[in-house]
Image: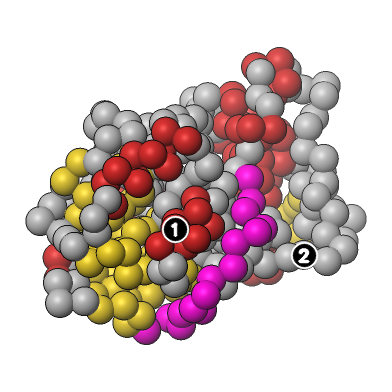
Amino acid sequence: MAIPFVPRIDDAPRAKPQRVTPLIERVIADNPSKFTYHGTGTYIVGGRECAVIDPGPRLESHRLALAAALEGRTVVGIVVTHCHGDHSPLAAWLHETTGAPRFAIGPHRQYQGWVDEDDRFPDEEDDTEKVGVDDEEKETIDLGFAPDVAVRDGETFLSTREFSMAAVATPGHTSNHMCVAMPEEGTLFTGDHVMGWSTTVVSPPDGDMRAYIDSMHKVIARNDSILWPTHGGPVTDPQPFLAAYLGHRLERERQIVAEIAAGNTTIPGIVRVVYAGVDKRLHRPARRSVWSHLRKLCDDGVVATADGGAPRLLGEYRITR
Ligand SMILES: [Zn+2]
């Protein structure tokens, strides 16, 4: 299926700070992948007194690029949108070096008793192992991260003479995800909630499709003038982009319901049809996204599990009538 929103391509050099607006510099980490696209974009906001959003992965070239860009400046805040391995790990180093407080909604939520079902399906033709996916291509979680200041939704948690930053809680990609508003430039830093190049992976148990869709409506209602995602280029026309981005997600949901109605009742089966045009290395995260849709659809009463139990990755589904 064609992607109805136009991806914002990014080909800026990596490990090299670039000024992108009067208040914002961006340093792209040299960690391109199926998840990070061109690489993690770390934002430095402000002049002499600055804040750093998503310091990025533990990567020496990135750490050195940030250290050079921050030379002679005072870091007044370290802001983390969520605790995935490509966003938060260097916050520890930056906090140690600068003493600046780390701001986030909270640490990554831990799930007791959660069984992460094995989602390798060895007998299917698009077995991810055959196309060389390894664990490095999974989104890793930085469980070591904890903020010094837990911010609340809507709170202006940082202000300097030049800029201010407010938290916009956007659970969905992760339960502790936040976007960061900087009203001085009409900017919303969207982390992984809205990416410039692709839809976001929503992976249970921490990823939650209903929360994600609610958070999309919340961002649409804000009417910011520009979005700066962590991955991919800026979105300078947020309203049509966001409408198409959400539309794409809802279209996926309709496709999933249609597949089940047509007798295609398992997650790998649905992914094979609905994600037929997508790189097979992304089928594994796609299965988790479909699962997340099905958890929501079961909740909505549109779909039920064939065995009447909880919606599982390995389960079978039917339409409720
Ligand atoms: Zn992420």
Q: Residue 106's spot in the image, x, y percent?
A: 56, 72
Give the camera-side residue of 135 and 308. Answer: 135
Give the camera-side residue of 197 and 11. Answer: 11
Q: Nearer the viewer, mark 1 or mark 2?
A: 1
Q: Residue at x 14, y 72 (%)?
A: 162
Q: Name the colouring of the figure.
A: secondary structure
Label 2, on which residue? 111
Check disc 2 and give the amino acid type.
Tyr
Q: Residue at x 80, y 50 (%)?
A: 116
Label 1, on which residue? 97
In which quadrant will I find the N terminus? top left
Q: Residue 267's spot in the image, x, y percent?
A: 71, 41
Q: Residue 269's spot in the image, x, y percent?
A: 70, 33
For mark 1, give the secondary structure: helix
Q: Residue at x 47, y 35 (%)?
A: 60
The majority secondary structure of the magenta stretch comes to: loop
- Inspect the magenta stretch and tell me whether residue 236 lies in it: no
Q: Is residue 166 visible in this depiction of the protein? A: yes
Stretch of the chain drawn in magenta: 140-155
Residue 156 falls in image quadrant: bottom left
- In the image, taking residue 121 as reference, residue 196 lies left or right, namely left
